[in-house]
Image: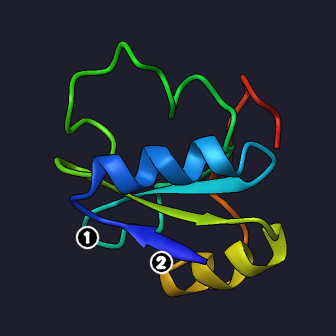
Amino acid sequence: MLVFNNDEKKYLDWIQKNPRGYVLNVRKKPDAEYVVLHRASCGLITSDKREYGGYTMRNFRKICCTNIDDLRIVAKHEGRKDGTFSKRCKLCKP
């Protein structure tokens, strides 16, 4: 499991190398209301059209893993007491 905070290049490199992985999109400061699960291949979190810094440098961190169960543990640390995600992306349907 890797946490990307203020590191666009390493985040996008991980995405490219792990297209079958998962990404938890969370705010810089833990917020139980925003713990969103995506597939690593999801266009919402990988688009080249996004302005540089939009993934990990402004308001969000990305927590990446190849095992969805490990991200449930992370969800608890983000404030989701039951280990659920506040949302699953409707585009990539993880």
Is disc 2 surrounded by few (<14), some (14 to 19) or many (20+) residues within 10 Å? many
Residue 32, placed above or below residue 86: below
Task: Looking at the picture, tell me which residue is in the foreground, 16 or 66.
Answer: 16
Residue type at mark 2: give it.
Glu
The residue under label 1 is 29
Residue at (44, 72) in percent of width and height: 3
- Up-down: is 47 above or below 3? above
Q: Amino acid at mark 1?
A: Lys
Q: Position of residue 29 (x, y in %)?
A: 25, 70
Q: Which residue corresponds to the image point at 28% horizontal and 64% vertical from the top-left?
A: 5
Tell me which residue sits at (47%, 68%) in the image. 32
The residue indicated by pointer 2 is 78
Residue 83 seen from this side: no
Left of 80 or right of it: where is 32? left
The Cα atoms of the two marked residues, 2 and 1, are separated by 9 Å
Disc 2 is placed on an element classified as loop
Q: Nearer the viewer, residue 74 or 66?
A: 66
* Residue 49 falls left or right of residue 76: left
Tell me if I can see residue 5 in this picture: yes
Q: Position of residue 80 (x, y in %)?
A: 59, 76
